[in-house]
Amino acid sequence: MSTAEAVAIIIVLAMTLYACSGLADFGAGLWDLAAGGRAGGRQRRALIDAAVTPVWEVNHMWLIFMLILCWTAFGPAFAAIMTALFAPLTLAAVGIVLRGASFAVRKDAARSGGRHLAGWLFGIGSVLTPFCLGLTLGALMTGGVPPAATGPAPLTVTAVLVGLLAVVTGAFVAAGYLAAEAGRRGLPELEAWFRARARVAGAAGLLTGVAALTALYFDQRRMFDLLVGRGWPLLTIGVLALGATFWLATPGRRRGLRPAAVVGVAALVLAWAVAQYPYLLPFGLTIEQGAGAPATMRWVLVWFAVAVLLVGPALVLVYTLDQRDRLAEEG
């Protein structure tokens, strides 16, 4: 394995962890938007606040890490992606800012009207961000980003469906996470409410996934063949794990819901990465062609090892304290 391939694997791992966190907010913004009126949805929103707040900033770390590695290690590919997909990436950034600012403002707003408006903006940002990031991934998969991109990438049906799939998958995973969180906190009514949403979102995700795969067949046959040919073991694991998540979301079951969701999402992201290997930009720029200077790649790996040693234990501690309800007490 070359140093460039090692750095590419690190980027894929960061992307996988970001996806497993529901793109930082566990995808909960959509359910915050659909929680109901001010009175009826108060408990649901309170649970979302309690689940997301302690790990909000931690989850954003993966996105920042991924972006820094991309422009440091694979500058030509990063420049082409930013040129061809400037519009969706800008909208994704707007969604991230809108989501974070609104979430923070809602907690501190003095008036109920301000809190309600901030909640709406939080939900809108949480839908806009995964859709635009999924749209970007879909455009990349269909070969819409040439190495010397000078204009916007074409908007394909596959790209739109992958964007919708990102939203629906996030909603499915978020509902599963929140159902498990409600169960852990002894809130049966909220647990049942989120379980029902998980089943609906899971069914919608299955239909959207099949539609996206069908559209990929017509938009980029080569990528389709690689995805179902080379990536079929991971696709199978992903489908089985998400199917298990769907089953575990039925009443009477609690254990294993969150791990199954994590495995399902991770397997789907990795299936895409395996299918696209060795290309950064299908099918015009490989990892080796787009890599920076050898010294840069070596130093990226060195600092990644340092980061793992410094940040890894802190992350384990944060998630452990969160699950033991110690962060709120200490805060």
Image (cartoon, rainbow, N blue to C red):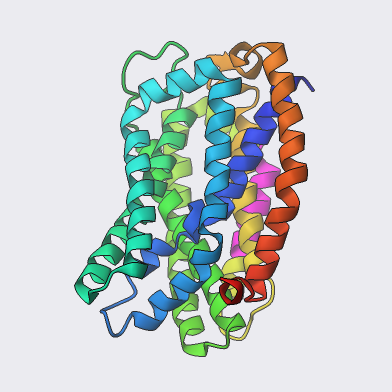
Q: Position of residue 328 (x, y in %)?
A: 56, 74
Q: Is residue 284 visible?
A: yes
Q: Position of residue 41 (x, y in %)?
A: 33, 80
Q: Is residue 206 visible?
A: no
236 above or below 175?
A: above
183 relative position to 145: left or right: right
- The image quarter in which residue 298 lies: top right
Which quadrant holds the C terminus? bottom right
Q: Position of residue 56 (x, y in %)?
A: 51, 58
Main secondary structure of the magenta stretch: helix
Q: Position of residue 21 (x, y in %)?
A: 56, 55
* Near-viewer residue (7 or 296): 296
* Near-viewer residue (303 or 273): 303
Q: For residue 237: magenta?
A: yes
Farthest residue to the left: give it: 113
Q: Which residues are magenta?
A: 230-244
Which quadrant holds the N terminus? top right
Q: Residue at 66%, 50% (x, y): give it.
A: 236
- The image quarter in which residue 117 lies: bottom left
Q: How many marks?
A: 0
Farthest residue to the front: give it: 330
Q: Residue at 41%, 38% (x, y): give it.
A: 215
136 relative position to 229: left or right: left
Q: For residue 35: magenta?
A: no
* Near-viewer residue (224 or 302): 302
Q: Residue at 66%, 11% (x, y): give it.
A: 293
* Near-viewer residue (205 or 73): 73
- The image quarter in which residue 289 lies: top right
184 above or below 321?
A: below
